[in-house]
């Protein structure tokens, strides 16, 4: 559920690889490996999904996505690499095992043959010879200070990437529980993925070409491509941030609603930096609009306004449930509605004796309630909708998020 709404792990993986190959791999062995690990460690909090979707929403982008935890996240990545290096060292340093002499009738016994028990797959030896016991001197040295700095930069990149999208994170938690979201890059940006992938694939292609031509192997290939990708990422962020600002200016100067505006939000689309989805809140309703910053066009359907639902005993009870508390803590644009006795996916309605009644309370965050690829708004359910069954207006009888029941 939540995994589909975060800056998906491939972007973090590729960013970490580019950080390692941008020059830090020249300072120490394992730089790229530790950068990739540190870029992914924070998302281990998705394991809370094993405890149910509500627990996953509660803990996702929690303590592991904070400045307080970042040094420990980096240390965990370095510790994993240290354990891996120790294991490789033990394999390299195993004594050579000699086979027993082979005796064949009528022939003298063959001499003992050494069985190779180790292979240094961390780095090949000099002059193209495979690594092993005699190749250890050729291995790039490990500088643990540089390795930790690499991991720290990569762990911070995870927080920065997650801040750019509209899911948000709480970097100052637990001292400040506020959520922060840049909301100018879509959760999975194909342009960014393409640039990062190109930066890692092109050096490999050039290496194959050099091998076919018999050219000398180049050490630390791909530094320029990695720097190019990271620079392009920052430039893309700056461009999208500027377009978001222009969209906000257009929205403020247009009369989308006649009622006083309490607040507004601008949500990104993938690929196209000129297209934005706007949400406007007034005292009585929410209004949406589509903005094209290239043409300056704003389209909005006044008949599609979402009036704020009235509070009922069921909605007030639902807000006090575990799902309600977690959802309202995270949902910057949460809307809570009493739908009546409506069954929801994967959550069986309560079986009640005669005389008792149940209703469904829906939690929706308007930040994720827009149609990405065209069509009319409202044609799909938000991927982060939550539901609570309430019996007789005061008793909770089941919770679910995105079609997954909280047990």
Image (cartoon, grey):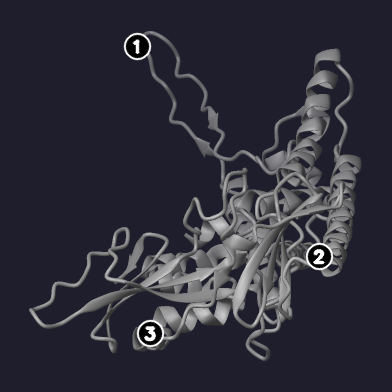
SS for callout 3: loop
Q: Residue at x 91, y 41 (%)?
A: 224
Q: Say if mark 1 contacts mark 3, CB within 8 Å.
A: no
Q: Position of residue 72 (x, y in %)?
A: 66, 76
Can residue 29 be seen here? Answer: no
Can residue 375 be seen here? Answer: yes
- CA gap between label 2 and label 3 equals 37 Å
Q: Residue at x 58, y 44 (%)?
A: 375
Whether 267 is drawn above or below 23: the answer is below
Q: Mark 1 packing: few (<14 Cα in 10 Å), some, or many (20+)?
A: few
- CA gap between label 1 and label 2 equals 95 Å
397 relative position to 176: left or right = left
Query: Which mark, residue 251?
Result: 2
Judge by depth and name the residue closer to the eye, 309 or 342.
309
SS for callout 1: loop
Q: Position of residue 216 (x, y in %)?
A: 89, 24
From the image, which quarter does the C terminus lie in? Answer: bottom left
Q: Which image quadrant for residue 105?
A: top left
Residue labelled with disc 3: 321
272 relative position to 176: left or right = right
Q: Which image quadrant for residue 4?
A: bottom right
Q: Residue furthest left?
A: 354
Q: Position of residue 52 (x, y in %)?
A: 37, 69
Judge by depth and name the residue closer to the eye, 302 or 71.
302
**Which is more foreground, mark 2 or mark 3?**
2
SS for callout 2: helix
Q: Identify the mark nearer the N-term, 2 or 3.
A: 2
Judge by depth and name the residue closer to the eye, 153 or 122.
153
Query: Which mark, residue 105?
Result: 1
């Amino acid at each position: 559920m939540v995994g589909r709404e975060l800056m998906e792990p491939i972007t973090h993986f590729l960013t970490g690889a580019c950080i390692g190959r941008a020059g830090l791999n020249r300072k120490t062995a394992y730089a790229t490996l530790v950068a990739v690990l540190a870029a992914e460690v924070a998302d281990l909090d998705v394991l809370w999904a094993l405890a149910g979707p509500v627990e996953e929403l509660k803990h996702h982008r929690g303590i592991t996505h904070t400045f307080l935890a970042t040094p420990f996240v980096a240390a965990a990545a370095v510790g994993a690499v240290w354990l891996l290096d120790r294991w490789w060292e033990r394999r390299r340093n195993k004594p050579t095992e000699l086979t027993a002499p082979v005796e064949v009738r009528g022939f003298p016994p063959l001499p003992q043959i050494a069985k190779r028990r180790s292979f240094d797959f961390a780095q090949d030896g000099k002059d193209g010879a495979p690594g092993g016991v005699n190749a250890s001197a050729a291995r790039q040295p490990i500088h643990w200070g540089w390795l930790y700095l690499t991991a720290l930069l990569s762990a911070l990149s995870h927080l920065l990437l997650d801040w750019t999208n509209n899911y948000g994170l709480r970097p100052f938690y637990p001292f400040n529980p506020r959520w922060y979201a840049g909301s100018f890059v879509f959760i999975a940006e194909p342009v960014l993925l393409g640039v990062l992938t190109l930066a890692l694939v092109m050096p490999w292609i050039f290496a194959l070409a050099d091998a076919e031509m018999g050219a000398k192997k180049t050490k630390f290939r791909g530094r320029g491509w990695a720097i190019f990708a990271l620079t392009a990422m920052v430039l893309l962020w700056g461009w999208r941030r500027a377009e978001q600002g222009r969209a906000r200016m257009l929205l403020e100067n247009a009369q989308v609603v006649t009622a006083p505006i309490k607040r507004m939000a601008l949500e990104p689309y993938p690929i196209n930096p000129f297209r934005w989805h706007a949400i406007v809140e007034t005292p009585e309703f929410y209004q949406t609009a589509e903005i094209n910053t290239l043409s300056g066009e704003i389209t909005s359907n006044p008949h599609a306004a979402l009036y704020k639902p009235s509070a009922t005993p069921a909605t007030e009870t639902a807000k006090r449930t575990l799902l309600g508390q977690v959802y309202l803590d995270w949902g910057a644009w949460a809307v809570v509605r009493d739908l009546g006795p409506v069954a929801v996916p994967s959550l069986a309605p309560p079986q009640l004796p005669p005389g008792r009644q149940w209703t469904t309370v829906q939690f929706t965050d308007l930040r994720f309630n827009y149609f990405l690829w065209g069509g009319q708004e409202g044609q799909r359910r938000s991927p982060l909708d939550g539901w609570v069954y309430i019996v007789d207006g005061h008793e909770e009888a089941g919770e679910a998020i995105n079609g997954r029941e909280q047990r």
